[in-house]
Image: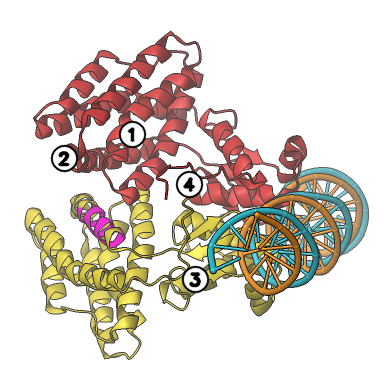
Chain colours: A red, B yellow, C cyan, D orange
Amino acid sequence: MSNTDFDPIVDTTRRAEIVTLLKRAVLTGKLEPGQKLNELRISEQMRVSRAPLREAMRELVQEGILTSIPYAGTFVIEVTAKDIEDAYSLNQVLDEFAIERTWPNRTAAFSAELDRRHAAVKQATLDIDTTRQIETALQLHGLIYEWADHPLLLETWQRLTSRLQMYFALHQRARNEPVPSLEVHEDYVRLLKGDDMKAAQRHAREHIALDFEELVGFARTLEKRDRASAARKRIDT
Amino acid sequence: MSNTDFDPIVDTTRRAEIVTLLKRAVLTGKLEPGQKLNELRISEQMRVSRAPLREAMRELVQEGILTSIPYAGTFVIEVTAKDIEDAYSLNQVLDEFAIERTWPNRTAAFSAELDRRHAAVKQATLDIDTTRQIETALQLHGLIYEWADHPLLLETWQRLTSRLQMYFALHQRARNEPVPSLEVHEDYVRLLKGDDMKAAQRHAREHIALDFEELVGFARTLEKRDRASAARKRIDT
DNA sequence: TATTGCAATATTGTCGACAATCTGATTTTC
DNA sequence: GAAAATCAGATTGTCGACAATATTGCAATA
């Protein structure tokens, strides 16, 4: 009886691939907030029938990055400043919990992975592709969730992340600036390796706050533009 | 311009109705954990084609109460003791946050609704239907999330709730006891109306702990039975 | 006897077509 | 001319059938 560990087979169904494609399109901003997803058009572009496409869209609706109105269509969710603030505040709470849970699980492998992802973040800054920067930053941040030994927490955070990534992408597309503040990541990594859990939690709280402040400000300016994209008309009799 | 408030139209699509039916079946334990959902059979029973059924199932997979293996089937999720513990610990964290957010929003209407739901809980204890007791208890508990003015938090909690409801139902089906501890609800309601937020948070933390202790214990005994229901055979070469 | 190969069956995944619904423009009616 | 009714077009929701895949039972083989 051998002890070889095999990775599970990649599920190769059209639906899964469509989910990947659509998700990427939304998270990178290729599909903009409020935009309608025409089933026929997309299915033809992907060379797929509408059935798996619709199933994929159902998943993404439930995942919270699409929204659906019966007989009207499925749309990319709108991003309001309050959404960002909410995501931020919840993220703070979850971060604290994640650090607490991950703390006793930190091993040499943890530190190694931490360094690896930190390096990836630094590497990405050289890159032209801004979405890559966002991805690496989120992956670095996600480590404390992956090591918390708490699937539900991880899942919850990943749902949050989808939205965060959308927000960041939107931010990046509008202004063409790099993601702010890099040396704080240095502190973050150092604290996660250290002995003072409270300090790490405190830092996470403030460190993230910085990134978010900018995002929220950006979202507010967007809202002032009062773009009437697909505005729902209110019926007053 | 009138000020009449209309309730939104119930989305009358088969898919939505199927979601409701399936969800209820799972949450009440009519569909047991690990059980496979045969598409053809269910679609025939519901007098519906497989398309809307499959879409509904996709939603529930994403919602976390079903799980799907490509070309193998869709199953009701298994409930492990660790799942319950995880749900519990996350719920603690979220509760504290929810109370903090709801605190400044408490109005007379809040107290009224609190009393209403509390009464519903007490009413349900007279009922024979145990699932009703679970529902009312969760609804009472959910109030702090509904008043937090934080859609993302509410959504996160509702996802949690689905699982909790499953766990409770499982618990109830096995032993035929009523839900434990009722007078703690009295304290809970009183504290939520009071001036001491910290006290309310502390109580929530401990009050829920009680209910959970029992659930976890129950789950552990279940696991010892080592039921091989739909056990996946491991391939050792 | 345990294992492998293969056919038969059942079930899931995907497709193309039709039905139900919404939207917008055009026509009708006052 | 303005409001209501009607109609055509487009899009989503649903259906039944077919294709792809997994499972099961049995025979063949070592």
Which residue sits at x=38%, y=54%? B155
Upstream in the sequence, badge 2 or badge 4? Answer: 4
Separation of marks 2 and 4 at Cα, in angstroms:
32 Å
Upstream in the sequence, badge 1 or badge 2? Answer: 2
Q: Are marks 2 and 4 in contact (CB under 8 Å)?
A: no
Tell which tag, 3 or 1, sits nearer the viewer: 3
Q: Amino acid at mark 1?
A: Gly
Which chain letter matches label 4?
A: A
**Which disc, if any, is residue B35?**
3
Q: Amino acid at mark 4?
A: Gly
**Which disc, if any, is residue A64?**
4
Asked if badge 2 and badge 3 are on a common chain, one would say no
Q: Tell me, yes or no, if residue A32 can be seen here.
A: no
Q: Residues within 10 Å of mark 4 (few under 14, many from 20)?
A: some
Give the quadrant of the C terminus of chain A: bottom right
- Name the one closer to the observer, A158 or A71: A158
Question: Is A169 positioned to the left or the right of A90 in the image?
Answer: right
Compared with B76, B120 (above or below) is below
Q: Which residues are magenta?
A: B83-92
Separation of marks 1 and 2 at Cα, in angstroms:
17 Å
Q: Secondary structure at mark 3?
A: loop
Separation of marks 3 and 1 at Cα, in angstroms:
33 Å
Compared with B197, A197 (above or below) is above
